[in-house]
Image: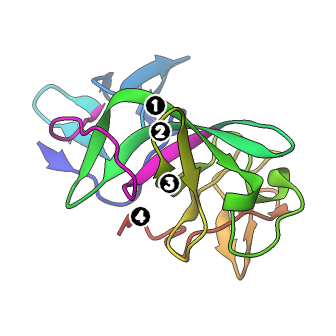
Amino acid sequence: MTKDVEELKSPGDELAMAEEFSAGEGTFEDDGVIRASVVGRAEVDQKSRAIVVRSINYPPVLEIGDEVIGVIAGLKSSMAMVDVIRAVREREREVANREEGTIHISKISDGFVSDVKKCFKQRDVIKARVIQVKPSLQLTTAGDDLGVIQAYCSKCREKLARSGRNLKCPSCLNIEERELSELYGTGRLD
């Protein structure tokens, strides 16, 4: 098994054509294209010719102070809903149960935020910190290494590239704002 360490893959990302590889764990086939169904790094099993996006180790239970990776699932005027899929500790690990958390508008940034939709879009992959576990999971993205770590163009769905403090689409040249992590585009989580 060899690892493709070039970049983090998100649900829906194209990994390969179905004629080249078969869909393995953490992937699915969509009209002849193998796509990721989870966030992680793609691996190719040369022997079986399958692409997989694997979970790592045993799942942890979240605690206050944990850093997590999640996908923005929905946006409201005062909060973002997040599907938390991975805890970042000494090593990345999938969470015990798929957790749903929220980021209140006041917890997005250290500065004033007037509109949640300028900071996040659906399908953005974020790194956040747990600030409350019970009765509901509450997260924050206030901090240099927290925020959006991967995003897609709202016009053409191409992966966005960092351009100063904004993001720019390499295909349609659309420029978008996000609450960016300093880790955006690095493929690193620490």
Query: Residue drawn 56% across and 73% down?
Result: 143
Quick check: can you spot residue 19?
no
Q: Are marks 2 and 1 in contact (CB under 8 Å)?
A: yes
Query: Residue drawn 55% across and 51% down?
Result: 139
In the image, which disc is placed on residue 171? none
**Residue at numbered disc 3:** 131
| CA neighbours of label 2 inside 10 A, class few (<14), some (14 to 19), many (20+) | many
**Residue at numbered disc 4:** 187
Residue 84 percent across, percent down from the top left = 47, 39
Q: Are marks 2 and 4 in contact (CB under 8 Å)?
A: no
Q: Are marks 4 and 3 in contact (CB under 8 Å)?
A: no
**Amino acid type, callout 3:** Ile
Compared with 108, 45 (above or below) is above
**Residue at numbered disc 2:** 84
Given residues 72 and 54, the one toward you in this image is 72
In the image, which disc is placed on residue 99? 1
Q: Which of the two discs, 2 and 4, labels the residue nearer the N terminus?
A: 2
**Mark 4 to mark 3: distance in Å?**
24 Å
**Amino acid type, callout 2:** Val
| Region rendered in magenta | 52-72
**Mark 1 to mark 4: distance in Å?**
23 Å
Q: Secondary structure at mark 2?
A: strand
**Amino acid type, callout 4:** Gly
Given residues 156 and 38, the one toward you in this image is 38
Q: Which of the two discs, 3 and 1, labels the residue nearer the N terminus?
A: 1
Q: Nearer the viewer, mark 4 or mark 3?
A: 3
Q: Which of the two discs, 4 and 3, labels the residue nearer the N terminus?
A: 3
Compared with 142, 26 (above or below) is above
